[in-house]
Amino acid sequence: QVQLVESGGGLVQAGGSLRLSCAASGGTFSSYNMGWFRQAPGKEREFVAAISRSSGRTLSADSVKGRFTIFRDNAKNTVYLQMNSLKPEDTAVYYCAADRSAYALYTRQNAYDYWGQGTQVTVSS
């Protein structure tokens, strides 16, 4: 069973930066495509970014393009989300997820097999 543990969330002022980490254990991390999702209060969970198992491909939501970067270190079994120029509307619980199939980069939640517990990001104005 794969376990995913996110960290790095916190409170930051608008315009600031945070780096989220997601450490994986219990599986073959390098064989999974990985994704980040977020859920703001009162809203549905939404796709943020995804990365292929070899880091050759990435995909980002339009709302974060140019501000957020997803990358991974397979030697450390960790995927990261570098978030710059943060806005109050980025406030949400951020989740990482793993896709065992690795056929493509997916934006839909049901394509992912394993999920972390989430980490809170709060951006103050």
Image: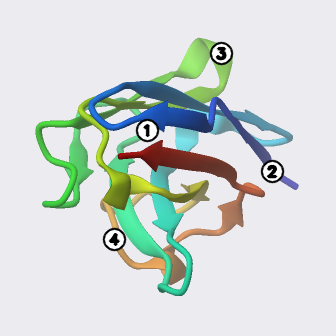
Q: Label 1 amino acid?
A: Arg
Name the residue carrying label 3.
76
The residue mark sitting in front, 4 or 2, is 4
Q: Are marks 4 and 3 in contact (CB under 8 Å)?
A: no
Q: Label 3 amino acid?
A: Lys
Q: CA distance from mark 4 to mark 2?
A: 20 Å
Which of the marked residues, 4 or 3, is nearer the chain's N terminus?
A: 3
Q: At numbered mark 1, what does the secondary structure look like: helix, strand or loop?
A: loop
Which of the marked residues, 4 or 2, is nearer the chain's N terminus?
A: 2
Q: CA distance from mark 2 to mark 3?
A: 15 Å
Name the residue carrying label 1.
53
Name the residue carrying label 2.
2
Residue at point 22%, 40% (across, down): 57
Q: Nearer the viewer, residue 67 or 102?
A: 67
Which numbered disc covers residue 107?
4
Q: Nearer the viewer, residue 38 or 88?
A: 88
Residue at point 24%, 43% (across, down): 58
The residue mark sitting in front, 1 or 4, is 4
Q: At numbered mark 4, what does the secondary structure look like: helix, strand or loop?
A: loop
With respect to residue 51, does 94 lie above or below?
below
